[in-house]
Image: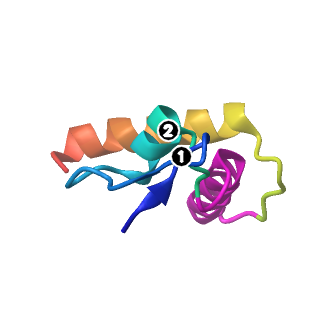
Amino acid sequence: MNTTTHDGLTRQPAEGESPHEGAILDGVPLIAPAVEGLHSLELANAMLLSAWTSQTVELPLNAALYEKWLKRKIAAGRKSGS
């Protein structure tokens, strides 16, 4: 698969090269903007927080509350050896 660089040149990506490398090295646009990935991550974190608290959560996510619960889950995992 060839990619077109920001200056209109076409090049063959190196084997194993990620789309991010092409974006950084050659200005090739990503399939989705990074902010969309952040939104997906926030949604996944909201689902976890909702499951942990058995409560409905709202977006944007309360980062302090999520961090508090995440630390609890990490500590519980360490105690149980998981």
Q: Position of residue 71 (x, y in %)?
A: 47, 34
Instruction: Decide which of 77, 18 is in the foreground and name it.
Output: 18
Q: Position of residue 50 (x, y in %)?
A: 66, 62
Instruction: Identify the residue position indicated by label 2 in the image.
Output: 26
Q: Main secondary structure of the magenta part?
A: helix
Residues in magenta, as a range: 31-55
What crowding class fits label 2: few (fewer than 14 Cα within 10 Å), some (14-19), or many (20 or more)? some
Q: Where is mark 1, residue-wise?
A: 5
Q: Name which of mark 1 and mark 2 comes first in the sequence.
A: 1
Contact, CB < 8 Å: mark 1 with mark 2?
A: yes
Based on the picture, tell me whether residue 22 belongs to the magenta stretch: no
Determine whether 72 is above or below 59 in the image: above
Quick check: 57 left or right of 49? right
Quarter the N terminus occupies:
bottom left
- The local secondary structure at tag 2 comes to helix
| Location of residue 18 in the rendering, given as x and y in whole percent from the top left corner | 35, 51
Drawn side of residue 61 relative to residue 38, left or right: right
Quick one: SS at disc 1? Answer: loop
Q: Amino acid at mark 2?
A: Asp
The quarter of the picture where residue 32 lies is: bottom right
Left or right, residue 71 beside residue 75: right
- Residue 62 or residue 54, whichever sits in front: 62
